[in-house]
Image (spheres, rainbow, N blue to C red):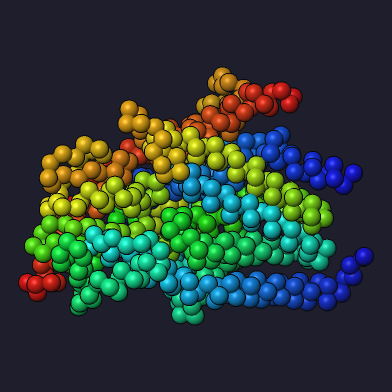
Amino acid sequence: MAKKLMKKTFMEPLGKNNPVFVQILGICSTLAVTNKLQNTMVMTLGVMFTTALSSWTISLLRNHIPSRIRMMVETMVIATYVIIVDIVLKAYYPEMWKQLGPYVGLIITNCIVMGRIEAFALQNKPMLSLVDGLASGLGYAYVLLVIAFVRELLGTGSLWGYRILGSWWTNWSIMIMPPGGFFVLAIFIWVIRETIMKEAK
Amino acid sequence: MNESIMPFAIFFASIFTGNILLTNYLGMCSFLSVSKELKTSLGLGAAVIFVMATTTPLNWLVYRYLLIPFGLDYLRFIAFIIVIAAFVQLTEMVIERYSEPLYQSLGIFLPLITVNCAILGASLFMVIREYTLFTSFLFGLGSGIGWFIAIIAMAGIRQKLKNAKVPPGLEGPGITLVIAGFMAMAFMGFSGMIALS
Amino acid sequence: MKKKDTFYHKRLYPLVFMVSTTVFCILVTSGLYLTTLDKAEANELSFTRRAILDAGGLQYENTTAGIEKTYTDSIEVEKGYYIANGTEGKRFIIPVQGPGLWGTIAIMVGFEEDLKTFAGLAIVSQNETPGLGARIEEPWFTAQFKGKQPPFTLVEEGTSALANEVDAITGATRTSEYFRNLVNRSAADAQRIIRGE
């Protein structure tokens, strides 16, 4: 029973309850860095770490938090985890840290983190909340990685910084520019809703 | 002759070419959900301008005179979000007490703003780009105005779109994102506007 | 458990809870910050040193220790500039900074002994748009200045042919222009700093 619930909690955010293409949440902080696969990978790992652990922490405290200051406590916990991500990146991956600039800090206002805490972690047990947070982060990560894959490949002809397509390829510069991010995300949502979501109904 | 960063160039760039919503995708969540209606968009947009233009210089002061002297700059995420939340709460209380019509048109949007990434984003950009107090203010104001323009334009377009035939999979957020993409392209066209000497 | 409506539960408990959470969070982050402080500072130093080595066109092993070794072996620090004693003769390196689109761009420029020909160029810090203006950090962009003499003119990405032409970055016209102004100015700076003219 418990195992089944765990599995359901894990699978839902990956498919029919995906934070990005079903709920359209939390694209703010990461969409801006999806013109490079490597940056996207690090950012989504940061989001995953923050969502999972802050859900877990809040769930641990859920019976003790006074309801009036709930939001403030949540923000504090989230900010702490984000600062941890920031400090670790700065110390061990300084080049990545420089490239991401302010976007790491913006994980704090990522709606998914707060959204999962409010919708799930406040009502559920710590381990289950951890799984839910992790799965939401994963569901978020793979959508953005697909977007980054398309944008970097079409925009620069390379992946992970390595040239993949030959010299015959003309770079679609629009892809790495801001409008490209909107278009790729829109097309992705369209495809998903026309195919997978339709079957689910 | 040394060039320096021109505050007014940053002001215009943050409204048009470097629009915080259309080039940095900040504030997307409320943008997508609120832009359904023109009236609410106006209210939220105005609130964003106000909060951004005040909290960016406010955070500059906090950063420069509180965090840096004590070597606490790694705590800036927490400090900034607290400043923003407290400021928003305070403004809401003041408006509620003194002006009922202003509260009805602006105040009810204030709680939505604390979680708007664009506000925190403006403060974080301001720190990383090492702006002065005056430039921070212009940057905050410009970003706010840029956000305002983007959301009312989008709301206007979406009202026209109500009677249009959109493929079912693209309805709602999908088509909004496509329009935002075109708007971003149009805003990039402003890049020739500020001539550099 | 039923919550009692006492002073303790209504006022004191939330306050105590908030304060203790805040203190705990700050302790955790401060601890982490302090343990990684040395490493972060070493990284910062290593970044600057690597930029100096790159600008001087020196070969080195790309690790903190490797950079350190080559730096101490072949760099002389003078007032306001550096001298690199590499296998290809003496080179002069000066730090230059100027405005970019969003903030200051700081670079190291290496000159051959004539103080006109570029031996190399490296970015120390910049705040341009990721994926667009920030591409000035990519090796192909900085490498194209090597062996050329300013003043440079910008041409479309991938089309530079003449001796004083450099590729601009598509989608980052403004950053490319600022960068061109910066490098064009650097030769005069070098004359002034090194020769005292």
Residue, far front: C87
The residue depicted at 59 percent of the width and 65 percent of the height is A84
In the image shown, does B113 or C58 lie closer to the viewer?
A: C58
Is any atom of residue B144 visible in this view? yes
Above-or-below relation of C166 to A196: below
Is residue B38 in view?
A: no
In which image quadrant can residue B96 be found?
bottom right
Please tell me which residue is depicted at 92% across the width and 65% down the height of the picture.
C2
In the rendered image, the quadrant that contains the N terminus of chain B is: bottom left
Q: Nearer the viewer, residue B100 or A123?
A: A123
Q: Is residue C188 left or right of residue A141?
A: left
Residue at image location 50% in from the left, 66% down from the top? A91
Rendered image quadrant of residue C161: top left
**For this view, does A8 lie left or right of residue A29?**
right
Q: Residue at x 30, y 74 (%)?
A: C72
Q: Give the camera-side residue of B36 and A131.
A: A131
Q: Position of residue B66 (x, y in %)?
A: 49, 77
Would you say A174 lies left or right of C191 here? right
Q: Is residue A201 left or right of residue A184?
A: right
Image spot of residue A177 (x, y percent): 40, 40
Instruction: List the single residue furthest toward the top.
Output: B165
How many marks can you see? 0
